[in-house]
Image (cartoon, coloured by chain):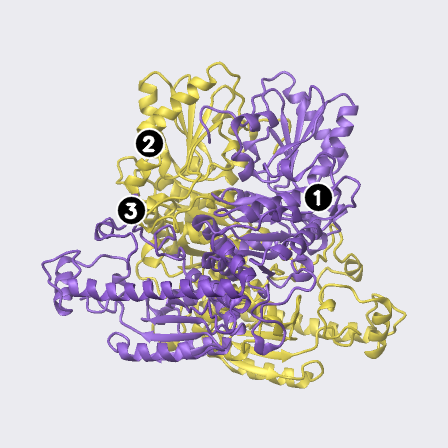
Chain colours: A purple, B yellow
Amino acid sequence: MGYPISIEDLKQFRQLHSKTPGHPESGTPGIDVTTGPLGQGISNAVGMAIAQANFAAKYNKPNYKISDNHVYSFFGDGCMMEGVASEACSLAGHLQLGNLIAFYDDNKISIDGATTLAFTEDVGARLTAYGWQVLEVPDADTNYEAIAKALEKAKATTDKPTCIKVTTTIGFGSLNAGSASVHGSPLKPDDIAQLKKKFGFDPEKSFDVPSDVYDYWRLVADKGEKANQEWDLLFEAYCQEYPEEGAEISRRLAEKLPENWEKLLPVYTPQDKAMASRKMSEIVLGKLEQDLPELIGGSADLTPSNLTRWTDAVDFQPPALGIGSYAGRYIRYGVREHAMGAIMNGIAAYGANFKAYGGTFLNFVSYASGSLRLSALSGHPVIWVATHDSIGLGEDGPTHQPIETLAHFRAIPNLMVWRPADGNEVSAAYKVAIESTVTPSVIALTRQGIPQLEGSSIEKAARGGYVLSDVENARLILAATGSEVSLAVDAAKELTAGGLPTRVVSLPDFFTFDHQSADYKKSILPDGIPVLSIEVMATYGWGRYAHAHLGLDHFGASAPAKDLFKEFGFTTEDVVAKAKKVDAYYADKEVLSRLDGPFSF
Amino acid sequence: MGYPISIEDLKQFRQLHSKTPGHPESGTPGIDVTTGPLGQGISNAVGMAIAQANFAAKYNKPNYKISDNHVYSFFGDGCMMEGVASEACSLAGHLQLGNLIAFYDDNKISIDGATTLAFTEDVGARLTAYGWQVLEVPDADTNYEAIAKALEKAKATTDKPTCIKVTTTIGFGSLNAGSASVHGSPLKPDDIAQLKKKFGFDPEKSFDVPSDVYDYWRLVADKGEKANQEWDLLFEAYCQEYPEEGAEISRRLAEKLPENWEKLLPVYTPQDKAMASRKMSEIVLGKLEQDLPELIGGSADLTPSNLTRWTDAVDFQPPALGIGSYAGRYIRYGVREHAMGAIMNGIAAYGANFKAYGGTFLNFVSYASGSLRLSALSGHPVIWVATHDSIGLGEDGPTHQPIETLAHFRAIPNLMVWRPADGNEVSAAYKVAIESTVTPSVIALTRQGIPQLEGSSIEKAARGGYVLSDVENARLILAATGSEVSLAVDAAKELTAGGLPTRVVSLPDFFTFDHQSADYKKSILPDGIPVLSIEVMATYGWGRYAHAHLGLDHFGASAPAKDLFKEFGFTTEDVVAKAKKVDAYYADKEVLSRLDGPFSF
C-alpha cells in the first residue's frame, strides 16, 4: 500500500526497535491508534467518527463534499466485555453516527476458552438497544460476498452506526482452529505447512507474498492515490470559492494554530477578584473558542460543575434530535469518563488539528486511567478539565476527593499535570496544553475561590515552576501547587516578618518544569535551602523536589471545605509551625538540592 | 430500625465527624458499601449476590435453608452510563443471579439536564440482552402497589436477576420536580413548606418524624429481630446435625481464619528452582484453597496467564449451564477488570470472611482504578493477583507494560502493594493479605522466572522491608523489589568483591514497611549510607527511601524480556556502574536516611 514497512520489518515481529511490535502502535506508519488494551479501538473509532462528522458539517459546501469518509473498526468478544466499549457504543448510538462501521468478530473464543464461560449475552440485541444497526454474516469464514453486501448496506445507512457481526472461526484453517490457543501462540511448523497448502500457498516458502497478490494490492493503492489527487483538485477549487474556509482548513491540516492565538488568553493582576480556577478555565475556553474552530470539548455529565461549556456553545448532536448539530462543538459525553478519554484520543488521531478537551471531577479522571495512559503513550495532546481538585470540594466527601490522583498522573511518562494557582497560571496551563502536539494534559482546577497572586505571569508559569515571591537570603522554600500557593504566600509573609526569610515557589506542572534547563531549575530550588512542599494530597513523589512535606496521606471527609482545611492542618498557622520545624531540623545539616544527584533520575 | 443513628446525626448532614456524610460511606452503621462514584453500587450488589449464592450452595442442607436472602440495589441513569455497571450487569445475567433485584430509577434527569442530551438507549432492552428479567412500573411516583407486585414477581424468579424499572419524577412534590437542580441543591424554605403540606406533614416542624411513622418502622424492625431469632434457632439445630459445617460457619461469621492456616504456605530455600512468581502464586492458591473455603477468586479472562485457578477448581457458574455450580469458587469474570474490582468489594462486604481475589495483568488493574480506590477507602481486604508486572512480560509491548502503576497504587492510602522477589516473599505477601481485615492488596507478580534468594523468609518479608544480604561496614545500599532484587544481589556481590561493601534491602511492600517501628526501619536504611533504588518502573516516589534511582521513566517496548532489560540498563554491569557513581557522589557529602525529617511525612 506504499507505507514504509517491508517484508523485512515483518520478520522483526516483536523484536527490539522494529516497526512491528506485538500490538498496533500509532508510531508505525499507517496505524491510526495504539490499541491492544481491550475496548480502546472501538472507542477511538467513535471519536474519529465524531471528528469526521464535525469537520464535514463545518466545511462541506454544496458541490464540495470535502469530507465524507467512513470510520472502520474491528472489535471482538473481549472488547465488548469491557465497560469502555459499552460507554462508547452507547454514545455512538445516541449520536446516530452513520459514518461508523464496526465489524464484530464473533468467534466465541476468549483467552479463558469458549465465551460461554463468561459472556452469554446477546451482543446484537445490546447494540440495537444502543441505537445501532446490526447486520449479521453467520458464515464469515468464507462468505466474502455477504460481507461485501453488508458493507454496502452499512454505507447506505446514514442515521445510525452499523455493526456487522461476522461469525468466524478463530485460527481458521489451522489445526487448532476454534481454540483459545491460537490467540497468542505461534502455529507449529506442520500446522503452518498444511495451512499454506490448504489456501494455495507454497508451504516451502516463508515470508513470501505471491506477485499476483502484490499486483492486486498495488491496484488498491493506486485507486487511493488517484482519489487523493482528485481530492486535491476539489480542495483547490474549494479554496477559490471559499477562501476563508480553505485557508482555515489548510492551517488545520498543517497542524498550525492561528497566529497570535495566545493573545486571547486572559491576564490577571492581584487586584482582580478571587474566583474558583474552574471559573477561570471557563473564561479561557470562552475566549479560545472564538479563534480555534478545532477546539471541541464537553463534559462527562458535569457541565454545570466543570464549567466547560462556553456561552452560546452549540451541542454536538445529531440533527434529528433538534437539540444541536454536527457542526456543534460541545459534546454531551454522559457519565462515561473512560469512553470520553478514548473518544478524545480518537478525535486527536483524526487530525485536522482537533483540540479535544473533556471535563469531569479530578478524582474521576481515574475511571479513565486506561485511555489516559494511551493518550500519553500514543502522544495525543488531549486536555482533561479536571475540576473539584481536592478536599476543597468539601461536602461530597472522600469518594470524590483526590488523594493519590496527582501522584498517579505525574508518574505517567509524557503527561502534563497542571495545577494552576491563579488566573495567570490557568492561562499558562491552557497555553502549553493547546500548543502541545504530542503531550496530553490534565488541568486540575478548584471548586472553591482562590486569589490572584502577586508575582505570577503566563510566561513564568509556562515553565512549569518558578519563584513566585522571594526575599533576600532566603533560608526556607515553600513549594506548592494550586490552591495551596496562596497559603504558602501568607505563611511566607509571616515567617519572613518573624525572622525566617522564606521564598515561595509555585510548581504548576512537574513535567514542564523537569524539561527546563538544569541551571534554571537549580535557580528555583538551589542547594543550601530546605524545601517544604505543601499540597493537600498524597506526599508520594514530592521527595523529587522537597525535603519535607505537608500533605494528606489519608482519605478526606465530608464537610465544608474550610473545616477540612483546618482539620487536616492546612492553615497559615499550621504551615508556619511546620516551616519552623523544617528550619530548625536543617539548621545543623548540609542541605543539597533534591534536583541533584549522581545521575539524573 | 435500631441502628445507632439519631435525628441529631441527620442534622449534622455533611458536617465534619458526622455519621451522615454527603455520600453513603460503609463506616456508617447500616451502610453495606460506600457508593457515590457511579456504577459501583450495582456492581457491589452483583458481588454480594455471588457471595450469597456461593454461601447458600455450600452450606444449605435439606430443611436448613440457612442462607436465602436477596440482594437489593438502586441505580440511576448515571450508573447505567458507566462502563463498570455494564460489565457487572452483563456478568450477573450470565451467572443467572436470581437473588439479585435492582431498581432502576428511570427519572430521565442527569446533572447536565434531560437524559435526551446523551442517553437515549433502551436500558430495558439492554438488560434483557444481558439475560435479565425487566419489569416496568411506569407510574412509580405513586403506584406503590405496582412496585410491591413487581417485587413479588422478582422474588419468585430464581434463574435470572431482575431489574424493576421504576419511572419516577426527580424531586417529586417539589416546585423543582423534574429538573436537574433538585439533584444536589437543597430545596428553598417555601418549597419545603409546600412539599410537607402536600404530603400531610406539619410545615412548621423540621427534623420531625411523626409518631405513627416511628411506630410503623418499629414493627418492621421487630419483624427483623424476630427473623434473626428464628435464624439463631435454626442454626443451633443445624450445628447439631452438621457439626463440621456449623463450626466452619461460626468461624467464618466470627471472621477468624482456621488455626495454623499459615502452615500451608510454601517455604523455599535457595536450592529450590527458579520460576515465575505468578507460578509461585499459583502454588500458594492451590495450598490455601484446601483449608480456606472462604477463598473465592478468578481472573478477568487471563486464567492461563495469571495462573489463578487451582487444579480441580470448580467454576462458579449457574447450574443450568452445566459447566460448574454455585458452590464453585472460581469465577470467570470475563474481560471486565473494573467490575471484577467492584464485585470483589461486594463479596468482601457480604461478610462470612470471604477472601476474594482477582487476576489480571498488573497494567490492567488500572482499568479498575475506581473500584480499587473504594476497596482502600471502605476497607475491603480484597486481593489483586497482578501478573506480568513489568517490561519482563516482553513481547506484548508498552501497552501492557506498567510504568506508573506501582507509584499510583502506593500513593493510595490503605493499600498494600506487594512485589515479591522470590517464593518466600510470595508466601509472605499472601500471609499478610489473607490476614488483613481492612486493607486490600495488590500482589505484583512476574511472567518470567526469578531465582529463590539466600536470606529471604516469610517472617522477614512480612515486615514489608528487610535486609536480604549484608556485609560489614556497608558503604552503599541497593534497595529493590521483585525481579530486580536478584539483580541487586548479583551487583552487590560484585561491588563488595571490588571493594565497595554493599547491602541489599528487599522492599516488597512500602505500606507494611511504613508501619514498622521507627527503630526497625532505621536499622534497615540507616544514616550514613546512600541508597540506590532499583525497579524497572517509574522512579516517582522512591525518594521516600532512596537517594538515587535506577528506574524506567518512559514507556517500554515490544521485544523479548532479556533484550529489554539490557536495552533499558538493567544488567548487573549497569547496576554496578550506577552504584559506583552513587558512592563517588556521596563520598564527600553528609548522608541522612530518607526516613528521617523534621516530622513524619
Residue furthest toward the front?
A240
Position of A453 with respect to A527 (left or right) is: right
Residue furthest toward the top?
B588
Q: Which residue is mark 1?
A: A267
Q: Toward which corner of the image does residue B570 lie, by quadrant?
A: top left
Q: CA distance from mark 3 to mark 1?
A: 47 Å
Mark 2 belongs to which amino acid? Glu
Position in image of residue B231 (x %, y %): 58, 70
Residue under mark 3: which chain is it in? A
Position in image of residue A22 (x %, y %): 31, 52
Residues marked 3 and 2, same chain:
no
| Of labels 3 and 2, the one closer to you | 3
At 72% from the left and 59% from the top, the residue drawn is B4
Mark 1 belongs to which amino acid? Val
Q: Which mark is residue B454?
A: 2
At 34% from the left and 72% from the top, the residue drawn is A106
Q: Which mark is residue B537?
A: none
